[in-house]
Amino acid sequence: MKVIITGGAGFIGSHIADLLIKEGHEVCIIDNLVHGKKEFINPKAKFYELDIRDEKIAEVFEQEKPDILIHEAAQIKVGNSVNDPMYDASVNILGTLNLLEACRKAKVKKVIYPSTAAAFGEPVYLPIDEDHPLNMMSGYGVSKHTVEHYLKVYNGLYGIDYVILRYANVFGPRQDSTGEGGVVSIFAERMINNETTYIYGDGEQTRDFVYVKDVARANLMAMECSINGIFNVCTNEKITVNYLFSLYNELLEKNLKPVFTSEREGDIRHSYMSYDKIQKEMGWTPKFTFIEGLKEVIEFYKK
């Protein structure tokens, strides 16, 4: 199949592109390189350096005639969505609508869209399943969830199929270790270089860390399934920040000590998700253990 991947030069999008090309699919990447990097672009993919809000998007879709859109491009920083909600909505909502209109005109068959665990807010129960109440605590959560409604509307009006994948905390090689980058990549870079590593609060907060190659495989399986719907992509396991730090010490054969600092306002204390639905309906389960993933992250940062 022919697939357009927005954000295909970024962390998750580039891994999806690599897997799809390996599986014999034809891939076009659209990325404005704000977060993405040229060195992450698979050489077998066709590349357009373009913002998803650009009016030229429709021309690319008309020219390429893709079967499927995998829409990974986004404004991804929660802090930015609080400080500049107009920009967040411009990229995540209006940018996506620009893509959906291009899909409609070019007769794209299906859209695969990554939503976010941020839509759930503070968990009412654990593990979080797809029926969990939504309680967005940031503009980012709102903008990502808003698109879920548009996908249902475009399916009803124009017959464009969709799969919404709500990712847990994705980690792996190529993840940004600066700013609000994932804690896994931040710890890896700092601990490899023997730099001071900070832990917010007491470090006993828990997260569900899912490996990026498992996430890429979920996108591949979503392409091939015939179901419209929302699916969690996660591990159903809770990992504390302190345990992550201790694992790095063990894998790096070091005895570093973290510096504990004040808890971040608005941080959720405990969160992990259930993958029962995606397992039952698509047959997806995570294949990589947390330690296997960390070893690949370490190799990436050592290089």
Image: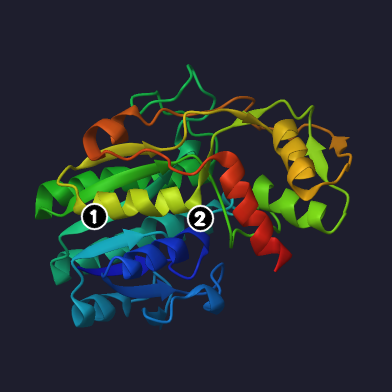
Q: Residue furthest top?
A: 125
Residue 139's label in the rendered image is none
Residue 153 visible, this orientation: yes
Report whether 5 appears left or right of 90: left
Report whether 85 appears left or right of 189: left
Q: Residues within 10 Å of mark 2 (few under 14, many from 20)?
A: many
* Residue at position x 52%, y 61% in the image: 11
Image quarter where the N terminus lies is bottom left
* Residue at position x 74%, y 49% in the image: 187
Within the image, what quadrant is residue 95 found in?
Answer: bottom left
The residue type indicated by label 1 comes to Met
Identify which residue, 278 or 286, lies in the foreground. Answer: 286
Identify which residue, 302 or 159, lies in the foreground. Answer: 302
Residue 88's label in the rendered image is 2
Mark 1 / mark 2, whichever is N-terminal = 2
**Residue 192 on image: x %, y %:** 80, 56
Query: Disc 1 designates what residue?
Result: 223
Image quarter where the C terminus lies is bottom right
Residue 78 visible, this orientation: no
The residue type indicated by label 2 comes to Asp
**Residue 190 on image: x %, y %:** 80, 54
**Residue 280 on image: x %, y %:** 25, 31
Report whether 172 appears left or right of 149: right
* Residue at position x 38%, y 31% in the image: 275
